[in-house]
Amino acid sequence: MPPKLRTMEGQRVGLSLRLLRNRLPRLRAGQSQNSPGETTTEPERIQEHSLSSFAGGQHFFEYLLVVSLKKKRSGDDYEPTITYQFPKRENLLRGQQEEEERLLKAIPLFCFPDGNEWAPLTEYPRETFSFVLTNVDGSRKIGYCRRLLILDEVEKRHQISMAVIYPFMQGLREAAFPAPGKTVTLKSFIPDSGTEFISLTRPLDSHLEHVDFSALLQCLHFEQIIQIFASAVLERKIIFLAEGLSTLSQCIHAAAALLYPFSWAHTYIPVVPESLLATVCCPTPFMVGVQMRFQQEVMDSPMEEVLLVNLCEGTFLLSVGDEKDILPPKLQDDILDSLGHGINELKTSEQINEHVSGPFVQFFVKTVGHYASYIKREASGQGHFQERSFCKAVTSKTKRRFVKKFVKTQLFSLFIQEAEKSRNPPAGYFQKKILEYEEQKKQKKSRDKTVK
């Protein structure tokens, strides 16, 4: 049965999950309802996934909120208001309550960022998008919003009774968060339906969690995506314009994901609420998404050196002008060739994600993949990055010119700071690609010697 749209007089309902994790995981869900004769095998399936298989100390979400639009006492305006919260406030510790007081005030605004021009309920598209709240210390909270529809599993229980939602959400919140490639199975009881088991599998390749490049490919050409990447690498100001909240959210997350293994550390707002449009006037780097209805306000704002991307038309409304010249020409051509090769043969979102992400990861492998060799360590294990020697090791003049600029960015600085703390390079996807590239160079060198 499809989820029922919950409607009330003068009220529209959205929902958000505010998560503890810095990156929202994409979980593949599979579920089965079992007859009494089948229930004996299910506990065995659950036991296969022991606590040692999961990342310790993480939860699926911090809390769930239902945000409704309610008419103000005076006038015809509506304001977003939290009408349901899990867990309840009284179940939170004092420190958690204080944090909640500060951060939850912002969440309703981000669930309904459209301003006060509310359309009739029937005219609203069903949208799924995410938003990001940045704390003073730079840490981020990611919210996942299913607008106008309550999440399927929650809604299914809401149709029966609000009391059924609580044990389901409690079980989900207390479940161990799966490590990459692992599965967690949740047991849930629904009156008149029996026991239900829901399996959630986390992707093995975690650097592409919560990323979908399809929307970006539908809106822009490969050349434009490369120019956006180049602007982001130099930590410039980037604004995306689109009609739909889903499009904005997906495209800005995809653009940020192109920076892997580096992380965007500046202002990052996938969907900017109307009351925060002044963000586009900030002198510091930012990556934000703005609804198309606010285009003129953005264009009239005092901005310098901004890349303004119209996702609806697939055009740049504003640019610095040198976006095509930031990356080394040969490496830029390599990215373009890789993106175009075999793109039409891809079927699944996972294949598309890997195809799009791969060339940009390879770009960083070829430009800064030798970083670990230029971290000199003390006896204590503390490392010190040798920036000058690192740059001089790049033999190509065009590559070296780019690297000298890139090492001055916060993207690179934060990455190196983490590397300096660790005795060994992290055994992740980026390191795997570095080792593969180094092995390829050795084999090529060996072949060249044999030919001579």
Image (spheres, rainbow, N blue to C red):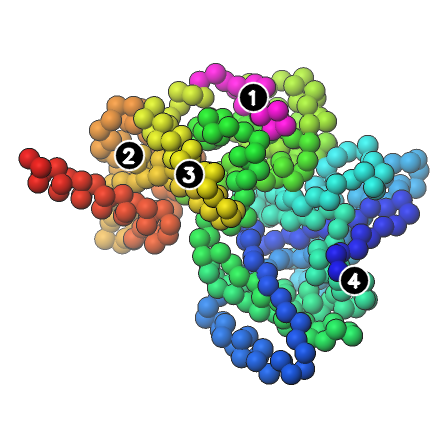
Q: Given contact means CB atoms under 8 Å apart, are the residues at marks 4 and 2 in contact?
A: no
Residue that numbered label 2 is attached to: 387
Q: Nearer the viewer, residue 39 or 402?
A: 39
- Label 2 element class: helix
Q: Is residue 444 visible?
A: yes
Please identify, in this view, whether the residue under mark 2 or under mark 1 is nearer the observer: 1
Q: Given contact means CB atoms under 8 Å apart, are the residues at marks 1 and 3 in contact?
A: no
Expressed as whole percent of the image width and height from the top left, the position of residue 233 reads 43, 31
User: Label 4 to label 3, Cα distance in Å?
Assistant: 45 Å
Q: Which mark is residue 158?
A: 4
Residue that numbered label 1 is attached to: 316
Expressed as whole percent of the image width and height from the top left, the position of residue 62 reads 63, 57
User: Label 2 to label 3, Cα distance in Å?
Assistant: 38 Å
User: Label 4 to label 2, Cα distance in Å?
Assistant: 58 Å
Say which amino acid is labelled 1.
Phe
Residue that numbered label 3 is attached to: 342
Circle nearer the N terminus (2, 3): 3
Circle nearer the N terminus (1, 4): 4
Say which amino acid is labelled 4.
His
- Label 3 element class: loop
Circle nearer the N terminus (4, 3): 4
Instruction: Give the class, few, some or many, for how many residues have Cα within 10 Å of label 2's Cα (few <14, many ≥20).
Output: some
Circle nearer the N terminus (1, 3): 1
Please identify, in this view, whether the residue under mark 2 or under mark 3 is nearer the observer: 3
Q: Which mark is residue 297?
A: none
Q: Which residues are magenta?
A: 305-322
Q: Is residue 278 magenta?
A: no
